Amino acid sequence: NKGKRPGTSTFMEALTANGTSAIQTSVTGMTASKRRFVDERRDQPFDKRLRFSVRQTESAYRYRDIVVRKQDGFTRILLSTKSSENNSLNPEVMREVQSALNTAAADDSKLVLLSAVGSVFCCGLDFIYFIRRLTDERKRESTKMAEAIRNFVNTFIQFKKPIIVAVNGPAIGLGASILPLCDVVWANEKAWFQTPYTTFGQTPDGCSSLTFPRIMGLASANEMLFSGRKLTAQEACAKGLVSQVFWPGTFTQEVMVRIQELVTCNSVVVEETKALVRSVMRSDLEQANDKECEALKKIWGSAQGMDSMLKYLQKKIDEF
């Protein structure tokens, strides 16, 4: 039996025997029936023009989990995941975002606008994906996952042009922790923010162990990182996680008006300004990212960490 742990053995057997098809069906079903997080366009083929860049440097690459629109003076990246639920992040999604950012870094885009299709921004890490792989070769897979996160987060840390984020809905876990790595964050009034890491059975990611205390103070940061306190858009704005909050009905228009203003600025001045603001923190952020990923690798590679994630997923299924 190789030491099956009480309370999780049946669940583990189901995962191993069925390739987690049962749990994935349950999670997918509960998501579809209880939460219409994604609008109807998610289920329809995107117009070909939205799937292909109009610039030659990217025109041959079709994205699966994001939509990239090259607009006048800026690149717009929208999460629209097909390989995960609710715009959650697995290595495939993260690689596509990195690819789009690397292209925008090299072309004539003055800035990047990051948002999402549907009514949710990002639900953080794709735990179904992780569980399916951690069930086998736990040590090796935990290392691969930690490295994927490290590279993803470093792409944001090292990006030289401004990254503007339009948070259209819930931002959870890594979906919330990357926000301080961006430069301006505008939120829909209906958006909310949560990093319930202890509930997930994991430690912080996205440099939140460093950025959250610096932005909102130690006490407020610990409320989010330890107890998973949920912040409304207005609370997030008051604590410095969000720049401005706009009404849902005019959110897109408000964002685009401000983006158009920003792209009229001199690109050299904008990049130099970002460099001045960010240069002091860059090495600290990279070190924090390394430490966080080492901690994640250690936890995911342990039996206790595996149990915590299984219990979290089982709880979510039981709730529905």
Image (tube, rainbow, N blue to C red):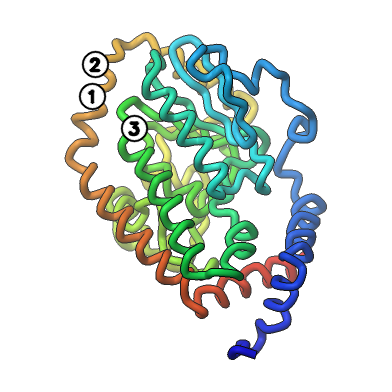
- Residue 11 place in picture, x, y as percent: 71, 77
220 relative to 271 in the view: left or right: right
Can you say whether 104 is above or below 216 in the image? above
Residue found at x 68% / y 48%: 85
- Which amino acid, mark 1? Thr
- Residue 36 place in picture, x, y as percent: 76, 44
- Tally the marks: 3
Name the residue beneath numbered marker 1. Answer: 273
User: Is residue 192 at all visible to an observer of this figure?
Assistant: no
Residue found at x 42% / y 42%: 179
- Which amino acid, mark 2? Val
Label 3 element class: loop
Observer-nearest of 317 and 5 = 5
Crowding at mark 2 (Cα within 10 Å: few <14, some 14-19, many 20+): few
Can you say whether 221 is above or below 99 in the image? below
Name the residue beneath numbered marker 2. Answer: 269
- Which amino acid, mark 3? Phe
